[in-house]
Each structure stands twice: as structure tokens, then as C-alpha cells.
Image (cartoon, rainbow, N blue to C red):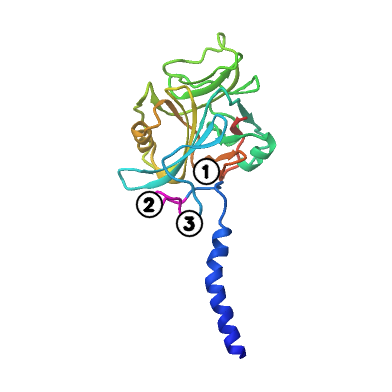
Amino acid sequence: MPAKHIRLFCLMLCLLVGPLLACNALPSATFQGTPSAASPSGNPSSQGAPLLNQWIKAAPGIELRYENWKSPGDNEDTVTIARFDLRYAHLSIGYQPTHPLSLSEWMQQSHALAVINGGYFDTHNRPEGLLVSNGRSFGTSYTGFGGMLSVDAQGRLALRSLRDQPYSPGDEQLEQATQSSPMLMIGGKRTQFSANAASERRSVVAMDKQGRLLLIVSPKPAFSLDELADLLASSDLDLETALNLDGGTSTGLYVNTESQKVNISSIAMLPIVIIIK
């Protein structure tokens, strides 16, 4: 066969076989980072991203969900939601003021199922509210505002408004706690608060009416706090309480199970994180 015919035959073979090989090389269903939108047919996009708006079982008691949220100002983001049945989840607060870590380093150090950034901290990495890590207390509780995620000495997890239920150190024995502000939802309804209208990366800890814990992250600077509260209240997540965490450059979420992985990295190094094992 003439050489030019051989070259033409090889080219045609590559065109026919190449797409088949590429299909076989597509990534698995596990996901890292922000997913691409689902196609109009409801199938995952060509990047292998998961479907939107449905729960994905990641492990016993752990589910993931991805939703496209849009504000009245037409800002939008794909929000990642992790939901935990507390019968399968143990929560602790990591605190390293002298040696803050990236979120991926916290994940490697703790060998956790999930890690999200915690409450606010100052320029010296001290908590702006109360923090309790493995029974050791730091800082001073907010009074009359904000909220607290906590685990008491009996292992009971709670998310509460500090305006409605102030912290009482003489009456409470906490093993873990982080405080932040503002409370975005109380009693299944959005709250009213004063906040600037800036759009930032956002992270939220919430409890639904079935008593499950939710970690919610918007990795783009898409929503103001008022917009975020409205979106949470209008969602189908059936939330009872929701607390804004330290957003902006602190926002991040890692989930690591055998079948699902989420890597949304914080920009800042973090002295405070919420760890779930």
C-alpha cells in the first residue's frame, strides 16, 4: 500500500477510535471542587459532575447535594451541602492559634470525614467569641447576639441563638463549641439583622427539623448575608436553625469518603475548624 494511503488509513482510525477511548477514560463519579451544572436532560455534564438537586449517599449517615442558587441581583453559585445523621457523626472543634493550617492540612492531620472553617478569629488567631476544644475554653462568649454550635459533656450537639439562650458557664459543661454571627435562621424562619451588602464566599452550619447537621458552602463571592438568609429560608432543606460562619477567605469544605470527595479550599490559613469523624 502506498505510504500516503497508510497515513490516511491511520488518520481515519484515530478519528473513529479516539472518542471511544476518551469515553472510557472519563473520571469516576467522585467529585472534587465545584460541580458543573447538569445538562438539560438531567444527566451529569461531560466533566462527570454529579446531578444537581438530589441527595447523594456518601457513607452511612452522610449525604451530599449540589444546588444552583441565584440571588435577586442575578448573582449565582453552585452551593455544596453536606448533611449528617448525628447517630453516625462525632463533632469536635480544632484550634491551633500558634500554628494555623490550610483546610487540606487540617483534613490530613485529623483524618476526618469532613472539615469546615469555624467561627471568627482576630489578627492573633484568637477566637472573637467563646471557643471550646476538647474541654478547654478560650475567649469570651458573645452576649445578646450571635449563635453557638456546641457539644456538651453528654455528647449532645446543639445549635442555638445566644440572644434567646445565653451561654451560662456555671450551668453548662461543654466539650466543644464555636461561636459566630449572625444567626440566619431560628425556629424555621429567617432572622433580621444588620449587615453590609457585600457579596462574599459563604459558609454556614445548620440543623434541620429532623435533627440532622448540615454544612453549606458557597465558594464564590456571590451572596450578601441578607440574600443568603433568604435563600436558606426558601430552600427545601427544612432548616430549623442556621448560623453564618467566618466567610470570605476562610470559607472552605472538605469531605472525604470512599465514594465521594469534596475539596473546596480556604484561601486563609485557619486556626479554628469544625471537624466531623
Q: Which residue is mark 3?
A: 46
Give the answer, above or below, for where 80 lies relative to 240: below
Residue type highlighted by circle 3: Ser
Q: Residues within 10 Å of mark 2 (few under 14, many from 20)?
A: few
What's the magenta region?
36-46
Residue type highlighted by circle 2: Ser
Give the answer, above or below, for where 157 lies relative to 270: above
Which of the 4 quarters of the picture holds residue 87? top right
Which of the 4 quarters of the picture holds residue 128? top right
Q: CA distance from mark 1 to mark 3?
A: 30 Å
Badge 3 element: loop
In the current view of this chain or complex, which residue is farthest to the bottom? Answer: 2
Badge 1 element: helix
Q: Nearer the viewer, residue 146 or 73?
A: 73
Q: Residues within 10 Å of mark 3 (few under 14, many from 20)?
A: few
Q: How far from the left and from the top, in percent, is residue 167?
A: 51, 15
Q: Nearer the viewer, residue 150 or 128?
A: 150
Pick whichever of labels 1 and 2 is earlier in the sequence. Answer: 2
Q: Which residue is mark 1?
A: 249
Q: How far from the left and from the top, in percent, is residue 136?
A: 65, 20
Q: Nearer the viewer, residue 187 or 210?
A: 210
Q: How far from the left and from the top, in percent, is residue 161?
A: 44, 21
Pick whichever of labels 2 and 3 is earlier in the sequence. Answer: 2
Q: Nearer the viewer, residue 66 or 122?
A: 66
